[in-house]
């Protein structure tokens, strides 16, 4: 398992994906499902707890993209609810703060103490990703983060957004390490010629 002291001290900056790298993405989605099920349950007078269970099971078994379709089929939801669901996914004020993985919190804090730069480069809907960032408990680290939404440039695995970071911040490829948890992240780092580490190099 890597610790910060195991990393190349010549690195000047670190680039992180957001979901399932800095925090568990399900912590956000499950709160959105709770809000959606509560809204539909109140409107239709249905059992919201059963609906939440359906949504969580679909998330685990088929992935986030399949959740609405699954619950729509099971409950014969009207199409109008899809817009409510999308709006919640992108803008919901979730009840509980999203907590960083402890090892990632420790790593980020050590990077800051060492006066290195931290970038978040995340795929996905920029509005939704920004909403997640706003709901994370950063423990004061938010002042040291620079965030980029890859979809506003070109989604990973394309390296364009990573090249943009290198250019804007006057960094060389050797200065940077990318930390992710998806093939898209690894392929992006390879295409840009940047060192890469997986989340599970730090978390066991």
Image (tube, grey):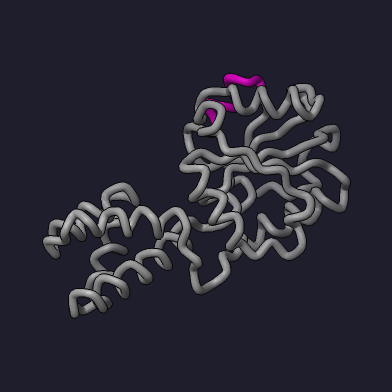
Q: Is residue 30 left or right of residue 78?
A: right
Q: Is residue 59 above or below residue 171?
A: below
Q: Is residue 131 left or right of residue 43?
A: right
Residue at coordinates 78% horizontally, 22% vertically from top-left? 172
Q: Nearer the viewer, residue 1 or 165?
A: 165
Q: Is residue 17 left or right of residue 43?
A: right
Q: Is residue 113 left or right of residue 150?
A: right
Residue at coordinates 19% horizontally, 54% vertically from top-left? 79
Image quadrant in which you'd find residue 139: bottom right
Magenta span? 186-193
Residue at coordinates 58% horizontally, 43% vertically from top-left? 17
Whether residue 189 is in magenta: the answer is yes
Q: Main secondary structure of the magenta part?
A: helix
Percent from the top left, x then y, of residue 45? 19, 80
Percent from the top left, x then y, of residue 54? 23, 65
Q: Is residue 140 above or below residue 177?
A: below
| Res 60 visible | no
Whether residue 40 is in magenta: the answer is no
Residue at coordinates 54% horizontally, 32% vertically from top-left? 152
Percent from the top left, x then y, of residue 42? 26, 78
Percent from the top left, x then y, of residue 140? 77, 62
């Amino acid at each position: 398992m890597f610790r910060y002291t195991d990393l190349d001290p010549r690195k000047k900056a670190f680039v992180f994906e957001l979901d399932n790298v800095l925090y568990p993405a399900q912590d956000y989605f499950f709160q959105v499902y709770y809000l959606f099920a509560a809204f539909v349950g109140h409107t239709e007078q249905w059992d919201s707890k059963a609906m939440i269970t359906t949504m969580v099971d679909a998330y685990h078994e088929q992935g986030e993209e399949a959740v609405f379709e699954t619950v729509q089929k099971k409950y014969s939801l009207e199409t109008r609810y899809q817009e409510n669901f999308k709006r919640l996914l992108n803008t919901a004020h979730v009840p509980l703060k999203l907590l960083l993985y402890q090892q990632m919190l420790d790593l980020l804090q050590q990077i800051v103490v060492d006066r290195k730069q931290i970038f978040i480069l995340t795929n996905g809907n920029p509005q939704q990703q920004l909403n997640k960032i706003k709901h994370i408990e950063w423990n004061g680290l938010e002042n040291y983060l620079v965030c980029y939404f890859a979809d506003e440039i070109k989604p990973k695995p394309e390296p364009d957004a990573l090249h943009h970071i290198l250019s804007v911040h006057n960094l060389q490829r050797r200065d940077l390490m990318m930390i992710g948890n998806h093939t898209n992240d690894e392929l992006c780092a390879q295409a840009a010629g940047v060192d890469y580490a997986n989340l599970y190099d730090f978390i066991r």
